[in-house]
Amino acid sequence: AIKKVIIHHDKFGFPKTTVREIRALSDRDLIGPNVVRLREIVAAVPAESECVMLHDRVVGAGQRAPPRRRHAAEDAALAEAQGAPTPSAAASAADKPGTIFLVMEWAPCDLAGLVASKVPMSTAHVKAYVLQLLQALDLLHRHRYLHRDVKSSNLLICADNTLKLADFGLTRLAEPAGSATRGRMTAEVITLWYRPPELLLGATAYGAEVDTWSV
């Protein structure tokens, strides 16, 4: 998946939601089988044949590959083998140089699209998806992260039926109980259909239970 970041240079600058997403997905504590991986961050440049990789890729436990310039041919060969769109192809389609793209793991569909396709799902499949979602949330919550936007369109489904929790733009760290800053979070999070009653009533002090309600 490739996410284009819209930057309003004349108003708000780099989006806060993108900063949160990059910060969360760069946290090694959140590396797990059911959390989408951020592969790299790509910026469009004037040259049509190349793009710049800004994000250090994780290449092993505690190791990172240095940032380097990647060419379209290299990206195309890798993406063709994986059946995924290339980051350089997305960057070359940018409106202007400086456009940023977040390159995630490739997944053929999300849960919302799978449900809309009317493809029959067995009880075993449903149970497997719910279990994987709960495992992803357990990983987040054990490290004090709140996702705050759990919904079917943010659940990627891989070809092997692995579920990946994605879209971390509204994610933030939960304040410990009794903290002086606890209770200063916004209630304007989580898509309305998945929003728990306390947020509908304007609560600003909440924790992992808001993600659990969305499930």
Image (cartoon, rainbow, N blue to C red):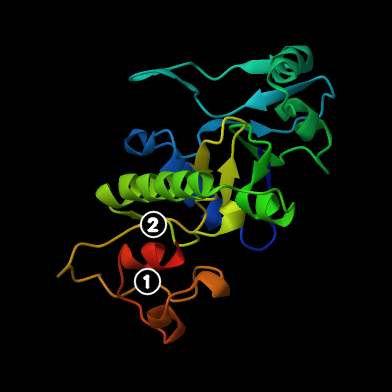
Crowd rating for badge 2 (residues with CA inside 10 Å; few <14, some 14–19, many 20+)? some
Q: Position of residue 203 (x, y in %)?
A: 36, 81
Above or below, 85 relative to 96: above
> Which circle's residue, 1 or 2, is located before the other in the chain?
2
* Quarter of the figure that contains the N terminus: top right
Which disc is residue 172 wearing? 2
Looking at the image, which residue sits at the far bottom? Answer: 201
Does residue 8 lie above or below 84 as drawn? below
Closest to the observer, 33 or 143: 33
Left or right: where does residue 157 sit relative to residue 213? right
In this view, 160 is above or below 199: above
Does 202 sit left or right of 50 as displayed? left
Q: Secondary structure at mark 1?
A: loop
Quarter occupied by residue 212: bottom left
Q: Amino acid at mark 1?
A: Met
- Whole-angstrom CA distance, mark 1 to mark 2, is 9 Å
At x 52%, y 44%, the residue is: 125
Instruction: Examine the image and state in which quarter residue 146 appears.
Output: bottom left
| Point 71% across, 15% down: residue | 81
Give the image location of residue 19, x and y in percent. Answer: 50, 49
Q: Residues within 10 Å of mark 1 (few under 14, many from 20)?
A: some
Percent coordinates x, y for residue 61 in the rendering: 34, 19
Quadrant that contains the C terminus: bottom left
Dot 2 falls on a residue whose secondary structure is strand
Taking the spot 77% from the left edge, 37% from the top edge, the residue there is: 97
- Drawn side of residue 19 relative to residue 95, left or right: left
Is there CB contact under 8 Å for labels 1 and 2? yes
For residue 128, above or below residue 76: below
